[in-house]
């Protein structure tokens, strides 16, 4: 099951291939199907975000796992691609995967399985561990990894991959916190980098650059 949001003008103009709007795909954590739409979908359909992310706005897809967590990267990739085919206003080269916890683990696994699917991947408290072959396959993908040192069991698994991708993958960020426990990435989170105007770069700033780049 899934929820798909399209900007108002494209709800009746789904076949507009010239629109080329980006797509943000959200993956919830374990046992979160009931709250995933409000937690992860709503921030991306907010008017302020829609105005900032892209001139024509963005499509937002909130996926619900078949069971209490995500499995089967291949079928999930086919679902995303089919949704894009049915809504030609979406730019298939500008898809962002966003995940929290098990959803963050899965979206990184999905990127490794289908390296051409995502332009960028966002992992909040994720724990997927890439091998060398997978890392080499996703070098063109832009990653935003965020972990917390006191998120025991998650940090130890997720931080090595996050650090590697932060250094080796194109325009990627790795953000590490001392005490944030188990958390998802928020638009206001700072990346530790600076914008061209000298202000602190936020996750939203980074995401806008990715989508428009």
Image (cartoon, rainbow, N blue to C red):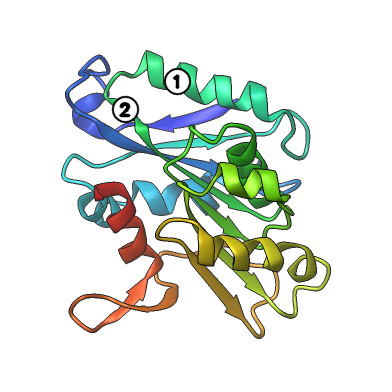
97 vs 67: above or below: below
Q: Is residue 128 visible?
A: yes
Q: Is residue 128 left or right of residue 206?
A: right
Label 1 close to label 2 by CB (< 8 Å): yes
User: What x and y, as percent, mark residue 95?
Assistant: 41, 38
Question: What mark, if any, has residue 105 been given in the picture?
Answer: none
Q: Is residue 17 left or right of residue 207?
A: left
Viewer-side residue, 61 vs 73: 73
User: What x and y, as percent, mark residue 193?
Assistant: 37, 78
- In which quadrant will I find the N terminus? top right
Viewer-side residue, 198 vs 189: 198
Label 1 CA crowd tier, 10 Å (few <14, some 14–19, many 20+): some
Q: Which residue is mark 2?
A: 90
63 vs 13: above or below: below
User: What x and y, as percent, mark residue 92?
Assistant: 37, 28
What residue appears at the point 49 percent right and 31 percent down from the top-left corner?
3
Label 2 CA crowd tier, 10 Å (few <14, some 14–19, many 20+): many
Q: Quadrant of residue 161?
A: bottom right
User: What x and y, as percent, mark residue 64?
Assistant: 63, 34
Q: Is residue 172 left or right of residue 111?
A: left
Viewer-side residue, 195 vs 51: 195
What residue appears at the point 56 percent right and 63 percent down from the top-left corner?
145
SS category of the residue bearing label 1? helix
Q: Is residue 35 visible?
A: no
Q: Quadrant of residue 151?
A: bottom right
SS category of the residue bearing label 2? strand
Q: Earlier in the sequence, mark 1 or mark 2?
A: 1
Q: Which residue is mark 1?
A: 83
What residue appears at the point 58 percent right and 41 percent down from the top-left corner?
137
């Amino acid at each position: 099951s899934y929820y798909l949001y399209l900007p108002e003008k494209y709800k009746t103009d789904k076949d507009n291939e010239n629109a080329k709007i980006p797509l943000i795909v959200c993956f919830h954590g374990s046992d979160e199907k009931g709250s995933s739409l409000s937690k992860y979908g709503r921030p991306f359909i907010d008017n302020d975000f829609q105005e900032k992310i892209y001139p024509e706005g963005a499509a937002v897809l909130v996926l619900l796992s078949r069971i209490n967590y995500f499995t089967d990267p291949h079928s999930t990739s086919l679902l995303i691609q089919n949704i894009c085919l049915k809504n030609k206003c979406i730019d298939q080269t500008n898809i962002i995967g966003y995940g929290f916890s098990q959803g963050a683990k899965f979206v990184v696994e999905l990127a490794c399985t289908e390296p051409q699917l995502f332009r960028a991947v966002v992992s909040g408290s994720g724990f997927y561990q890439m091998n060398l072959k997978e890392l080499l396959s996703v070098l063109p993908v832009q990653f935003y990894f965020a972990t917390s040192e006191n998120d025991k069991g998650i940090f130890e698994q997720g931080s090595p991959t996050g650090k590697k991708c932060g250094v080796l993958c194109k325009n990627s960020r790795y953000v590490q916190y001392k005490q944030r426990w188990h958390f998802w990435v928020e638009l206001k989170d700072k990346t530790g980098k600076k914008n061209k105007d000298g202000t602190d770069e936020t996750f939203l700033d980074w995401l806008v650059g990715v989508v428009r780049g």
